[in-house]
Amino acid sequence: GEDVEQSLFLSVREGDSSVINCTYTDSSSTYLYWYKQEPGAGLQLLTYIFSNMDMKQDQRLTVLLNKKDKHLSLRIADTQTGDSAIYFCAEATYQKVTFGTGTKLQVIP
Amino acid sequence: DAMVIQNPRYQVTQFGKPVTLSCSQTLNHNVMYWYQQKSSQAPKLLFHYYDKDFNNEADTPDNFQSRRPNTSFCFLDIRSPGLGDAAMYLCATSRARHGGLSTEAFFGQGTRLTVV
């Protein structure tokens, strides 16, 4: 199966950390991605992780992967109002990238 | 510099009138994808090209076709647009390594299609 699921909505205060979660079902996935989409715009790749890694850090972003549980998370440290957007996780399998349902992050000033 | 370019950004077409959306890339990636994204939903894969090989998703309507005349360009043709086809159409590219496992996908800005 190729279902990728996320919670639909997350609200945090500016300066706090945000954690966006994602679960997937295809154990053959090779890369897992986080994309950001602002209103009316295309998707911007934020970061990705190889399936043989369990953590990747890139400035304010930390990705954690639990391959056993097929769980992926994105932590945004010191969340800013400019981080308000929809965040999609995605998994790459053979010749295909499948997206999650998206999590809308609202940052409260 | 834009690497995946979609034209136009906004397209208005009449119900039933064929329309073509275009995508070009400067990355020399061998895989190109077309996704449909309706409001508040995840992008849904319509089809993709692996080099010249066309791969259609099982639930993509026959109304949607695609052409890839060369590595750089890919077109989405909607033969008879209906009101339900109004959406954002996203083009993406990736490099598939030996064995077909893709690297990260790069997206264009999308074309927002309105059907009147």
Image (tube, coloured by chain):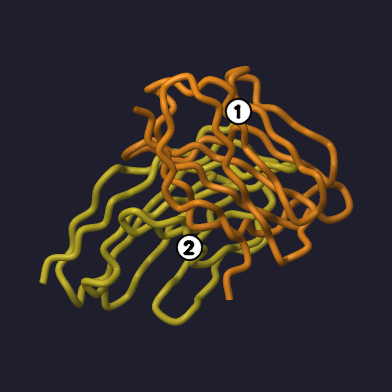
Which chain does the numbered disc 1 sit on?
A
The residue lying at 55 percent from left, 33 percent from top is B19
Residue indicated by mark 1: A1
Same-chain check, marks 1 and 2? yes
Where residue A12 appears, x then y in whole percent? 18, 63
Apparent side of residue B11 relative to residue B101 in the rendered image (left or right): left
Q: Residues within 10 Å of mark 1 (few under 14, many from 20)?
A: few
Q: Which chain: yellow?
A: A
The residue lying at 51 percent from left, 35 percent from top is B44
Which chain does the numbered disc 2 sit on?
A
Q: Measure how far apart labels 1 and 2 are at the Cα level.
A: 26 Å
Q: Quadrant of residue A1?
A: top right
- For residue B29, above or below residue A9: below
Which circle, 1 or 2, is nearer the viewer? Answer: 2
Q: Which chain: orange?
A: B
Tag 2, which secondary structure?
A: strand
Residue indicated by mark 2: A44
Instruction: Check disc 1 and give the amino acid type.
Output: Gly
Residue farthest along the bottom direction in this orientation: A59
